[in-house]
Amino acid sequence: MSIKDLNTHPGNDEAGMIRRVFWLSACICFVLVFMFLIGPLIIKAPWVRPIAEMIEEQDIEANMFFYTEVEEFSDADSFFRDTMKYTPRKENR
Amino acid sequence: MAEQPEEQKGTNEQEEVVIDKARGQLSDLWKKEDYWAIWLGFAMLIFGMLIYFNNPPAKMNEIIDNANKIMAAESEKATFKTIEWYKASDKKKKLKATGSPIGKKIKTFTNKPHSWKTNPLEAFFMGSDAAEAKKKKGEKKYDAARLQEESTLAAATSAQAAATAASYANPDLNKKAKESIETWRNSHSKASKVKKKTKVKPYNQIFPLIGMMIVLGIFFGIGMHVMGNNIVQFLIGFTFVFFIAVLAYLGSSQATMKSIGIGYPAWGILFGMIISNTIGTPKWVKPAVQTEYYIKTGLVLLGAEILFSKILLIGIPGIFVAWVVTPIVLVTTYIFGQKIVKIPSKTLNMTISADMSVCGVSAAIATAAACRAKKEELTLAVGLSLVFTSVMMIIMPMFIKAVGMPHILGGAWMGGTIDATGAVAAAGAFLSDKALYVAATIKMIQNVLIGVIAFCVAFYWCARVECAPGQKIHAVEIWHRFPKFVLGFIAASIIFSLIYQGMGSDAAYALVDHGAIRGMSKIFRGWFFCLAFVSIGLATNFKELADYFAGGKPLILYACGQSFNLAFTLLMAYIMFYKVFYHITEKI
């Protein structure tokens, strides 16, 4: 990527470029530290560990945001369709 | 970033608004991105329907009929769901058009980066040796899970036989059989999950991703070209935006990030912001930073995933918990934000209120687009939702367990309050299958509400918010101002709901739910939103974002709204599931 192409910040001087690259590197380092150091520490905390282990074991897409992206929703859909339609009759008597 | 003159600032603010000005001209049909979002979205949906409706699973109708006959017969004779009942239901569940040869090919081509833990290369490439090792590890776990399932099935079979021998007239034997069958179902569900880990195959995702980039580049490029933009410049910039989108997916597919609920929206915004606020977004990338274009097209696809038949899945209690509580919380939070917290921006207030009360990121996207919120406002809402979701996903099931709350009530409570669907699934599964099913269904019903909310917000904004005090707005004026892509969004939802209803829920489950939706709409909508979040990040300035957070007002609004939501949802769930419609709770 050419530094001439960078237009967001004023002044494309060498010092400015070094500063920007430094901040970019610092941000990348932070992401890596979060992903490989802080994240694993969080999931090792006693109150987080059981649910984190279950998510990994059952491969739940815990970070998705719509029902079609999570398989468990399809299971729930199927369960309730059949449960409501074919309820054991004697159970309600 | 350089200080801009006031005049230029104003112009930029106009540009940052999510929707362009509507004018009543025929050429709008091919010159406005609102319409292009509709054309592109529907082209994708029609393509998906043509593929999957013509490739139904083998003997689909026969299997459905047989399974339904078995379930009807079992429900007539027994006082509980028998083993045969569940096995028949499982057979129907396996019918998926996405399992057809063409469905599998589409899946291979459109796969996002795979799951990985410590080596990011695993997201893109896995050799046969590594796949074999992973498979063996999975097989070991599956053997243990299968043995467990077999033993619980044997126990359930014997308990059921005892209840059958007593003609289902002995309540103790019935209760024992029901419990044994539930234990078998739990181990069956675990074994099914583990089984997937025995099907590891080597893969190389690099070329499919390049193919995907080309397909999406051309897909959006056509619209850009017709709208009068330079397609070559767009395609050049698009390679960069797509690359960052792949990185966002890479971040979200990391095992630890999955466990704490950090998904691609957060990574897309973060990576984009890191670039724009350090080295700056390169000039050559800017023609492809088309947030609104990607969001609107993604929203039209999302419309197809909003199926109105889902709202009746769990009966009236579900409608009360999801469709009565949610709008009340939304309106109350919005009024609270305006009158008490005094949020300076109405669009920020509405985006956060919808994000918190409806269903997190998807509601935030739809509402932000409908009320013309700014990119920074959407970013803020998504960030708040992410933090609260991660915390609630961990704390709520622990609290429910600690106080001994019934799992159906707990499931309904979590489904109605935790923002993100993935987190709802995780929190529900942590309690039990029942809690998971109830939580997931309530959330699903709430998801369907997005269409109605987006339409109402768009209408309210056109008719009330965006006019001068005392000004009377005519229907024609509302039509001109109305964001047209919302019509595509609603139309897709209505059309797919009608198709679903027309096919019958069993066939529609195989062809619509697990065909055109999960095999087409969901995949591409995910990419479109990811591209949109990257674009938001590439156009967002840290300082400007901080201004929106001034005084911590958005956080106060979110926290107060969520507290009200927690209390009201719990109360409504208790009244509906345990006082008014307790017979429905007994069925579950």
Image: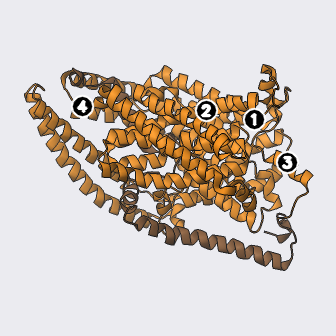
Please name the residue shown 80% across and 62% down the image: B282
Disc 3/disc 4 C-alpha distance (Å): 62 Å
Mark 1 lies on residue:
B34
Q: Which chain is brown?
A: A
Colour assigned to chain B in the rendering is orange
Whether callout 4 and callout 1 share a subunit is answered yes
Q: Which of marks 4 and 1 is nearer the N terminus?
A: 1
Q: Badge 3 sits on which subunit?
A: B
Labelled pair 4, 2 in contact (Cβ < 8 Å): no
Amino acid type assigned to the residue bearing label 3 in the image? Asn
**Residue B525, percent across and down?**
61, 43
Q: Earlier in the sequence, mark 2 or mark 1?
A: 1
Q: Residue B453 carries which label?
A: 2
Seen from the viewer's position, the closer of residues B573 and B172 is B573
Is residue B16 among what the camera can see?
yes
Quarter occupied by residue B84: top left
Tell me if mark 4 has few (under 14), some (14-19) or many (20+) residues whose alpha carbon lies within 10 angstroms of its own: many
Q: Earlier in the sequence, mark 3 or mark 4?
A: 4
Disc 4 secondary structure class: loop
